[in-house]
Image: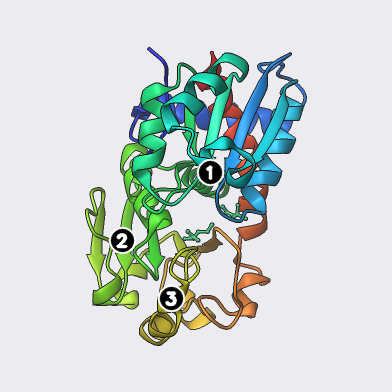
Amino acid sequence: MTRHLLTGEELGHDELVALLDRADALKAAPLSSRALEGASVALIFEKHSTRTRLSFEAGIFELGGQPVVLRRDELHLSRGESVGDTARVLSRHMAAIGLRTGADALIEELAEFATVPVFNMLTAGHHPCQALADLMTLRERFGRLEGLKLAYVGDGNNVARSLALLGAIAGVEVAIASPPQYTLCDARGATLTTDPGEAVAGAHAVYADVWVSMGDEDTADERRAALAPYRIDDALLDRAAPDAIALHCLPAHPGEEITAEVLYGPRQRIWDQAENRRHAQKALLELLVR
Ligand code: CP
Ligand code: NVA
């Protein structure tokens, strides 16, 4: 059975813990694994990326492999070749295929026809690789995951959904505060509220994402207006647990979803979180190509 990572729900609890253990080991010794020796991994981007591309490219190289970055407009996929045929051909050359796209249906179709692992580098619905790094960062700070509480404050989007799903597998309580019109639909694994103060009460981590995700630009003004009360600032952090950390998947818009004081301040673990993308994804690739 070819293993894929489309939502993160493919992972069991023990497997997720083992993956995070491997991520810690690979962070301590980045060149200790040759899991991709002689292998190529396709990274297909249909949307912008800074962190995902950098961390996967560098991580695949560190594992002894070669990343092959492709934009959709470079592939015949953009001029009518089917997803199935694209998957068949990619599978003859690549050890695994990463995709960043809009529609979850597209990555599901790619996985249906691929005979090598397909992993989700962000869709409209999910961002599981981000959540892996987030859990790693949380565990790094607190030494455990079971019993921790994470509060996500903002748009009920792909990042919120992946935190809910993977947090539940890891034993993390996830609370999500969003305006009613941008609440997370299908919020398995999380409790929902419209009140940021309620979400952050007792939280060990307070998490922000952009107010305007890629693909939501046409509703940017409405989103900025509705999400204004959902900014992470020092006052909101003060309402969380005394040792709470601030997290953000990035890119940040200081003054919108997070203040500059928090983004660059003493309680953030945001830049470690961005680095941990590489370590967590290397552990994921080891698992998928095994
Ligand atoms: N957090 C994240 O996925 O960043 P990029 O969009 O820069 O890859
Ligand atoms: N929710 C954001 C995440 C960016 C990493 C988006 O989809 O654009």
Look at label 1 and name its amino acid. Answer: Ser
Q: What residue would you read off at disc 3?
A: 218
| Residue at position x 42%, y 26% in the image | 84
For ligand 1, give the image quadrant. bottom right
Residue 289's quadrant in the figure? top right
Distance of label 2 from label 1 (alpha carbons): 39 Å
Left-right relation of 214 to 41: left
Q: Badge 1: few (under 14), some or many (20 or more) residues near its Cα, within 10 Å? A: few
Report if the beta carbon of the residue with label 1 is closer than 8 angstroms to ligand 1. Answer: no
- Front residue of 258/94: it is 94
Q: Is residue 139 visible?
A: no
Q: What residue would you read off at disc 1?
A: 78
Residue 268 lies, in percent from the top left, at 60, 64
Q: Nearer the viewer, mark 1 or mark 3?
A: 1
Residue 201 lies, in percent from the top left, at 34, 69
- Front residue of 38/45: it is 45
